[in-house]
Amino acid sequence: MSHAPVIHDLALVRRAENIVAEYAASRVQIIADRPGNPFDAQIRRYGAAIALRAPVFGEHFFNRALGFDDDSLDAAREAIDWYAEQNVPAVFEVLPGLPTGRLMAELADRGYRHVSYHATYAGPSELASSPSPGVEVRRVASEADLAAFSEAYHVGWGHTGPRVPMKPWLEVSGWRLYLGLCDGVPSGAAVLYIRGQTGYLADGAVDPRWRNRGVHRALLDARCAEAAAAGCSEIVSGADYLSGSSRNMLRKGLTLLMTKALWRAPATP
């Protein structure tokens, strides 16, 4: 299969972070839309930058600041104060290639520390698939599929707390849910989020009992194909650097776009 390569540049870095931020914001908005907003979930926008806050979740993606750099330093200061109001252990994602020296100095002065990295991958939507025996993927379209999706998602992510209400996930603009099956048994779950001509491969998870059978790769293949069919020209995804998920993305044909530096707020008493 021939395709035009996706050339890495600062514009792609910004687009990649923007779609991640918008997907995260949609997750937090779903929580905020629960009657009475019991978790006090909030979103603040500062131009292209977004700050998410849901204090009850602690150190979590729902307490994340995305898209800030030296050009939005005053907004970053406001976001830092906003998190400090409720002693939220927030994390700022600091992107390579953008001007961030003053941002990092400000974070350090406010007690934030660089604690880890997170990898972002990108590539064209039209990439070769690699079918695995006994593995299939279908788009979630029924309550039965959603129940199976929820089970695979929670088990795959090792989530032991209360189950996430997922019915709203079927109704969010730009979202598509996929259920992976191995030998006919629900075994994996993943989300495709589409914004403009970019598709974001989000939240891929595989039940540990069915790992190393090609389920994760099949979920990548299905989402890329659907993104291409929907008019997307590029794909973005993320994973812990050198994790199994990241290796599957490289096998798929995505390439490493960047590793983001994660700066965490000072520990609360």
Image (spheres, rainbow, N blue to C red):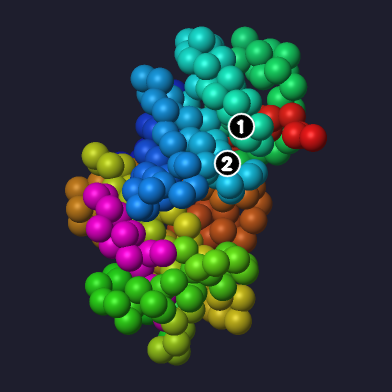
State the residue in front, 110 or 130.
110
Q: Disc 2 on helix, strand or loop?
A: helix
Amino acid type of the residue that numbered disc 1 sits on in the rendered structure: Gln
Does residue 96 appear in this view?
no
Q: Is residue 97 above or below residue 90?
A: above
Q: Residue at x 25, y 58 (%)?
A: 171
- Who's the residue at 62% across and 69% down the image? 160
Residue designated by label 2:
55
Q: Quadrant of the C terminus?
A: top right
Earlier along the polypeptide chain: callout 2 or callout 1?
2
Q: Secondary structure at mark 1?
A: loop
Q: Position of residue 252 (x, y in %)?
A: 46, 58
Residues drawn in magenta: 165-181
User: How far across and down, in percent of the image, does residue 117 sit?
Assistant: 66, 38
Check if residue 243 falls in the magenta segment. Answer: no
Q: Is residue 169 magenta?
A: yes
Tag of residue 218: none
- Report if the CB atoms under discs 2 and 1 are less than 8 Å apart: yes
Image x and y of residue 260, in percent: 59, 34
Examine the rendered structure and indicate whether residue 108 appears above or below residue 20: above
